Amino acid sequence: MSTAVKTTKLSKIYEGALRGRDVHALKALDLEINEGEIFAYLGPNGSGKTTTIKIILGLLFPTSGSLEVFGAKNIHSAAVKRNIGYLPEGAYYPEFLRGEEVIEYYGKLYGLHGRDLKRRLDEVIDLVGLAHARKRLVRSYSKGMRQRVGLAQALISDPKLLILDEPTTGLDPIARKEIRDILANLRNAGKTLLISSHELLEAEMISDRAGILYEGVLQAEGRLDELLLQRDTALEVDGLTPELVEKSEAAGLRVEDRLGERGKLRAPEGLSAYDAIRRCGELGLKLVSVAPRRETLEELFVRVIGAAKTSRSA
Ligand SMILES: Nc1ncnc2c1ncn2[C@@H]1O[C@H](COP(=O)(O)OP(=O)(O)OP(=O)(O)O)[C@@H](O)[C@H]1O
Ligand SMILES: [Mg+2]
C-alpha cells in the first residue's frame, strides 16, 4: 500500500500568538495516510487539525519536521498541488456569481481551459448534484448547495487527494447523507480523502482509519475495526418472569428494559456473546435477538481525550 501523506516529527509554533506567548500547535506529529482510504482527522477545537491541513497544502510552513505527499518531498511543486483538492472550513464564495462560474474560476486557476474545462465542469457539477441549480446565483444557495460548490471546486482538477475541513458542518441529515455518499463513491473510485470533522457518528460511518489529535499530539491512530473495541452484548429475550429477572441479574445479565415477559438484557464487558447466550439458555430464557455492541467512535474519542487530559494534569 503506498502512502499519500506522511509527516515526520512535524511541529508548528505560532510565535507570540497568545498574548505574546507562543502557541505550540503541533508537536512532533507523525501522521500517515494511505492511498485510497478515507482518513478521519479528529480532535477537539484548537487541537491542530487545520494547522496540519494548511501545512500539507503548503499554505503554512512547519517550524520543524518534514512531510511527503505521494512520495514527493517538494510539496510546493505544481505537480503535487494539482493532485490535491481542498475544501476549506466554512468556505466563502462570491455571492454575485453563479454556482458554475465559481467552479469554472477554480478550474482556470488550475490551468484548465476550453473544451477540457467545460467537460470537467459538467462532470463535477453532476457528481456533486448541483446540475439543477448551476445557473443560479450563489446568493440564493442554501448551506448544502454552497458546500456542494466547495466540493466541486475541490474536485475540478481531478486530484488524487482530497482534503476536506468539516465538510458536513451545518447541513441537514439528508444533505449529510448525500455528501457522505459522494465521498464514499470518490473513495471507491480510488481517491484518498483526509476529512477533518467533529461529526463522530458520520466519521465512523465512512472512514477506514482515524487519528485523534489533542494539543498537537496524535493520541490514537489506526483502522476503525482495530481502534473500536467490542464492549458488551445486548440480548432480547422472552419468558422473563419476575423470578427470572432476579436470576438474570444474579447471573450478571443486567435487565435494562422489560415489557411483560419481553426484556432487554445487557451482558457485561468481557463476557463473550457465546457465553451470554449460554447463560440465557441455562436460565430457560427464550432468545429473540443478540447484538454484540462495539464501542462507538464517540466513546473512543471521549476515552482517549479523557486519558490525555488526565495525564496532562497529573
Ligand atoms: N494563524 C494563527 N495564529 C496564531 N495561532 C493560531 C493560528 N491558527 C491557529 N492557531 C492556534 O493553534 C492551535 C491549533 O489551531 P487549529 O486551527 O489548527 O485547530 P483545529 O483542530 O483546526 O480546531 P477547530 O476544531 O476549532 O477547527 C490553537 O491553539 C489555535 O488558537
Ligand atoms: Mg479547524
Image (cartoon, helix red, strand yellow):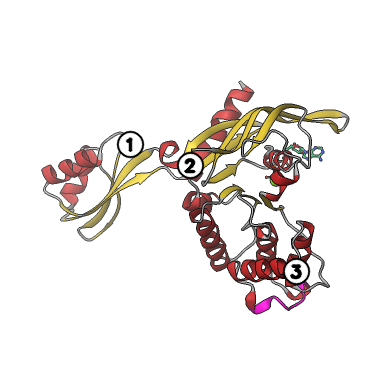
Tag 2 residue: 299
Position in image of residue 229 (x %, y %): 39, 37
Q: Is residue 134 magenta?
A: yes
Position in image of residue 172 (x %, y %): 59, 66
* Rendering quarter of residue 100: bottom right
Going by the numbered disc 1, the residue's amino acid type is Glu
Q: Secondary structure at mark 1?
A: loop
Front position in the image: 289 or 129: 129
Is 215 on the left or on the right of 302, as rendered?
A: right
Going by the numbered disc 2, the residue's amino acid type is Glu
Tag 1 residue: 269
Some atom of ligand 1 lies within 8 Å of the CB belonging to the residue at label 2: no
- Discs 1, 3 touching: Cβ within 8 Å: no
Q: Residues within 10 Å of mark 2 (few under 14, many from 20)?
A: few
Q: Secondary structure at mark 3?
A: helix
Going by the numbered disc 3, the residue's amino acid type is Gly
Observer-side mark, 2 or 3, equals 3
Mark found first going from the N terminus, 1 or 3: 3
Considering every residue shown, the one lying at the far front of the view is 115
Observer-side mark, 1 or 3, equals 3
Q: Residue at x 81, y 70 (%)?
A: 95
Mark found first going from the N terminus, 2 or 3: 3
Is 261 on the left or on the right of 164, as rendered?
A: left
> Quadrant of the image for the C terminus?
top right
Q: Residues within 10 Å of mark 1 (few under 14, many from 20)?
A: few
Q: Residues within 10 Å of mark 3 (few under 14, many from 20)?
A: few
Some atom of ligand 2 lies within 8 Å of the CB belonging to the residue at label 3: no
Tag 3 residue: 114
Q: Residue at x 79, y 64 (%)?
A: 105
Q: Which residues are magenta?
A: 132-138
Q: Secondary structure at mark 2?
A: helix
